[in-house]
Amino acid sequence: MYNEISMKFISKRSNIAIIRNVVSAIVLDNNPTITFINELKTIVSEAITNCIVHGYDNQEDKFVDLKVICDNEKVSIEIIDYGKGIADIEQAREPLFSTKCDEERSGLGFTIMEMFSDHLEVESSLDKGTRLYFEKKW
Ligand SMILES: Nc1ncnc2c1ncn2[C@@H]1O[C@H](COP(=O)(O)OP(=O)(O)O)[C@@H](O)[C@H]1O
Ligand SMILES: [Mg+2]
């Protein structure tokens, strides 16, 4: 079943739980399994956490854009921040690489997102922001 929904939300951490639930609600029409929903929520949480923690250094007054498209094959999600950007995307995507490993970060966010999605793209420009796009087949 086709659907398309876009949202903009501010970069506060309490929005992560809200957006996880909104995304779950959007895909429900396509009768996903519980595992599918849990994996999708995990990807979305990791992606939004990265926007807030890394892109915006935990500033709470910035914006994140999210677009969800469902079709008969898959759900596609685009998440964009307008923060500091990623200097070296290839390195950032390596398992265990983190620029903030002092805190609660494990450097496994991209690895988890790759594991739970069927296709993951990252585009980024320093001081302009980061666009993450992924697809997950039903
Ligand atoms: N939206 C983003 N903006 C800026 N840097 C990012 C963003 N997402 C990821 N990064 C960079 O990529 C690294 C790896 O991300 P990730 O695999 O999620 O690990 P972690 O979040 O635990 O550091 C981060 O430490 C950060 O340097
Ligand atoms: Mg992360």
Image (cartoon, rainbow, N blue to C red):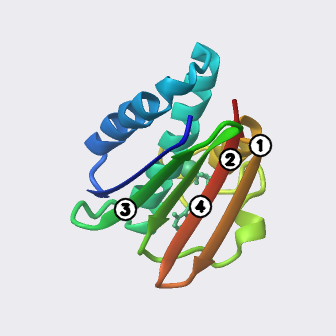
The residue lying at 31 percent from left, 65 percent from top is: 63
Residue 107 appears in the picture as rendered: no
Q: Which residue is mark 3?
A: 64
Mark 1 is surrounded, within 10 Å at the Cα level, by few (under 14), some (14 to 19) or many (20 or more) other residues, namely few
How far apart are the alpha carbons under marks 4 and 1? 13 Å
Ligand 1 lies under 8 Å from the Cβ of mark 4: yes
Q: Where, quadrant-wise, is the C terminus in this rendering?
A: top right
Which amino acid does the dot numbered 4 rest on?
Leu
Residue 118, which numbered label? 1
The residue lying at 56 percent from left, 26 percent from top is: 30
Q: Could you say where residue 107 lies in the image, as x and y percent from the top left?
A: 65, 49
Q: Name the N-terminal-most of marks 4 and 1.
A: 1
Q: Which residue is mark 4?
A: 132
The residue lying at 78 percent from left, 56 percent from top is: 94
Q: Which residue is mark 2?
A: 135
Q: Could you say where residue 96 lies in the image, as x and y percent from the top left?
A: 72, 49
Mark 3 is surrounded, within 10 Å at the Cα level, by few (under 14), some (14 to 19) or many (20 or more) other residues, namely many
Q: Name the N-terminal-most of marks 2 and 1.
A: 1
Q: Secondary structure at mark 4?
A: strand
Q: Nearer the viewer, residue 31 or 102?
A: 31
Residue 119 appears in the picture as rendered: yes
